[in-house]
Image: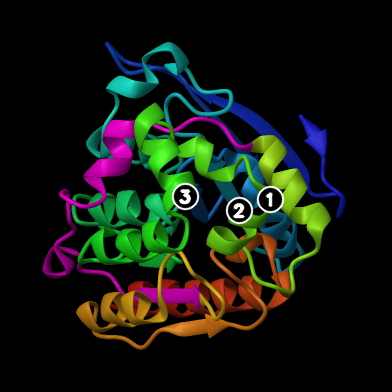
Amino acid sequence: MITGSNDQKLFNLIIPGAGLQPELNAVSFGEQPQILLVHGANSTLGVWRLLMNELSSCGISSAAVELRGHGGSGGKDDLQSFGIEDYVDDVLRTLEHFPSMSVLVGHSMGGLVAQLAAARKPLAGLILLASSPVGGMRSDGTRMFLRHPLRFAGAMWRKSFAHLYRDAAVCRSLLFSRYTPESVIRDFMDSVQEESWRAGNEMNTLLPDPQAVKCPVLVIGGEDDFMVSAESVRATAEAYGTEAIFLPRAGHMVQLEGDPSSLARLIVDFSARVRSENQNA
């Protein structure tokens, strides 16, 4: 256990494995987190640290989990065998471990994982940040390929999504706003890990069914996101019967850019509303 910058206790946790399921590494601000944060491809729970601090400052306890094969979770040697459904199982297992959690937040690939998990488990609310869209990543992927054909060709030849983020200019183009400090991009590049090639490609084939998600959904995008276009974000919001919210001065890595307090406030207000509605139902 370590102490966060706002004196909120930050707990390091291990969610036990079962059968072939590996142990999962997680952190929690507070002992009864209300929100679960799910990272995207090539990431770890480190991308959530700033947001978790902001949420804690607003009186909201949250937890973040590392999907199998990522960060401190088990399964690193088997990463390339994992698919999206494996990650969905990780999220469902984490929700069972924290019965206090009723709101699920997913970023990018984690947004797809969160949508599939929400279709299988009743929740108070679902929040999608720059999420893989309901129609898949094929259109957005083609646009990215056309802008950076050599970098994408190299990634395809190596079967390595991490290869996309070895060049700072390409990394900024795909993931960050033009306003983002170079230091933020370099820190992200230093933390990039490999992703399952299988799971990444399933983002085009294993698509969510919005009709199966029964809870309210908040859809948030970055105004300068090149990876998931504004059109894709709006299409996802429309599929869930809501309107997308776009954060200024933010690209795809919305939790690392712009004003983190604005993102935290959106999450806090939505979470408070859906929990109130759930209690009054």
Residue at (36% x, 76% y) in the render: 233
* Pick the front one: 5 or 38: 38
Q: Is 29 left, or right, of 95 in this rendering?
A: right
- The disc labelled 2 sits on which kind of residue? Cys
Q: Count neighbours of disc 2 (C-alpha within 10 A) and say few if under 14, some if 14 to 19, many if 20 or more.
A: some
Q: Residue furthest bottom?
A: 243
Residue 127 location (% of width, % of height) = 42, 67
Q: Which residues are magenta?
A: 192-221
* Pick the front one: 203 or 255: 203
Residue at (80% x, 63% y) in the render: 181
Residue 145 location (% of width, % of height) = 38, 57
C-alpha separation, residue under disc 3 versus residue under disc 1 = 40 Å
Instruction: State the residue position of label 3.
Output: 100
Q: Is residue 207 above or below residue 219?
A: above
Instruction: State the residue position of label 1.
Output: 168
Q: In this orientation, does residue 230 appear?
A: yes
- The disc labelled 1 sits on which kind of residue? Ala
Quarter of the image with the N terminus is: top right
